[in-house]
Structure formats: structure tokens, C-alpha cells
Image (tube, rainbow, N blue to C red):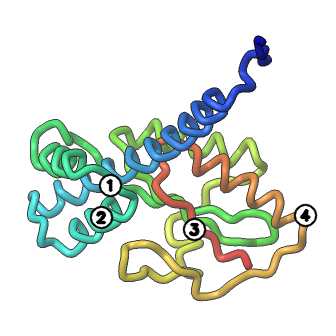
Amino acid sequence: MYILTMSGHNKWSQIKHKKGAADKARSNVWGKLAKRIIVESRLANGDPNSPTLRTMIEKAKKENMPKENIERAIAKGISNEAGSMESILYESYGPGGSAILIATVTDSRNRTAQEIKHLLTKNGLALASQGSAMWAFQKDIEGGFTPTTTVPLNETDSAALMKILEEIDANDDVEDVYTNAE
């Protein structure tokens, strides 16, 4: 007796596709963490006792980033390879007047600025001047931002904001996106 199965519908195919998606997501997170570790390592001259570098290392460990990858990123940060890796914070206002902070780590300030401007323009937004949206946030212990004031959004604005945030977060240079929307 032979059992025929339709191509692509066996258990192994399902596992393979799920694992591939999970691996891709993990790779994106590890890549962003590695960039951040490189920047912080460069600023701290490779000193793992630096509070900001130590915080980034702890974040990487929480994401199960291999020790070798962390060490490689620290070494790259103190070598000449790190070159011009830098952190840049972009600000904008989204639907319903919600403030948006876009934290990036990049080796090309101009390329990243153009990509962020394009993503915002495509969604009917524009870059705000430096400090214009920052008033709605305060820096937290882990180096991120928490809103000090929040803005309530209706369903339409909330859905539009989520779409915009997902598109921005998909950019390779974007580390984190913060908003003060409820």
C-alpha cells in the first residue's frame, strides 16, 4: 500500500518553513544588536565594564546571541573596521499627532537619512527638526525611550501608525522605533 502526499504538505516542509522564518527573524535581531554593540564598543574603547556596552551585551544575551558573535562585534568596534558606524536619532510626527522617534545605527548617514525620509514621505509624513518630538519622551535606564505624555488615537489613526512603524522597523539600519501613541 502506497500513501501519496501532495508536494509541500508534509510535516517536514511545514517545520522547515517555520524554522526558516524563525531563523530569519533571529538573524535580523542579532544583526541589529551586533551593530549596536560595535558602536558602543567603539565609544567605550572595548571596555565591557562600560554601562552602555554592558547593557547591550545583556540585551544580546537575552536574545540568545552566541558569545562568539558578541565578542566579534566588540572586537570589530575597537578595530579600524568599525569606521564610521554611528547612532542617529530621527524624529517625526505620525497620524493623530503622535510623536515618533527612530533610533538607527548606520555606516552611511546620508543613505539612512534618505531611506527614512522616503519611508516617511511614502506614508504622508516628514522628518521633524531635531528636538521637536523628543519632548514627549525620556531616556530610560537601558538606553531606550519611554513616553512622558501619551496621545490617544482612533482606530483609523492607530492602524495607519502601526503600518508605518512596521515599514520603518523593517529597515536594516533601524534599531528601535518609539511612539507616544496609546
Asked if 67 appears above or below 57 in the picture, the reply is above
- The amino acid type found where label 3 is placed reads Tyr
Instruction: Please report contact status of discs 4 and 3: CB closer than 8 Å, yes or no.
Output: no
Instruction: Please report contact status of discs 1 and 2: CB closer than 8 Å, yes or no.
Output: yes
Nearer to us of marks 2 and 3 is 2
Mark 1: secondary structure: helix
Whichever of callouts 1 and 2 sits on the residue coming sooner in the sequence is 1
Nearer to us of marks 2 and 4 is 2
Residue lying furthest front: 1
Q: Quadrant of residue 93?
A: bottom right
Whichever of callouts 2 and 3 sits on the residue coming sooner in the sequence is 2
Mark 4: secondary structure: helix
- The amino acid type found where label 4 is placed reads Thr
- The amino acid type found where label 2 is placed reads Met
Q: CA distance from mark 1 to mark 4?
A: 34 Å
Between 59 and 181, which is closer to the camera in this rendering? 59
Per the rendering, the mark at residue 156 is 4
Q: Residues within 10 Å of mark 3 (few under 14, many from 20)?
A: some
Instruction: Please report contact status of discs 1 and 4: CB closer than 8 Å, yes or no.
Output: no
Nearer to us of marks 1 and 2 is 2
Left or right of 65, for residue 166: right
Left or right of 31, for residue 121: right
Residue 167: x percent and y percent? 66, 46
Whichever of callouts 1 and 4 sits on the residue coming sooner in the sequence is 1
- Quarter of the image for the N terminus: give it: top right
Q: CA distance from mark 1 to mark 3?
A: 17 Å
Per the rendering, the mark at residue 178 is 3
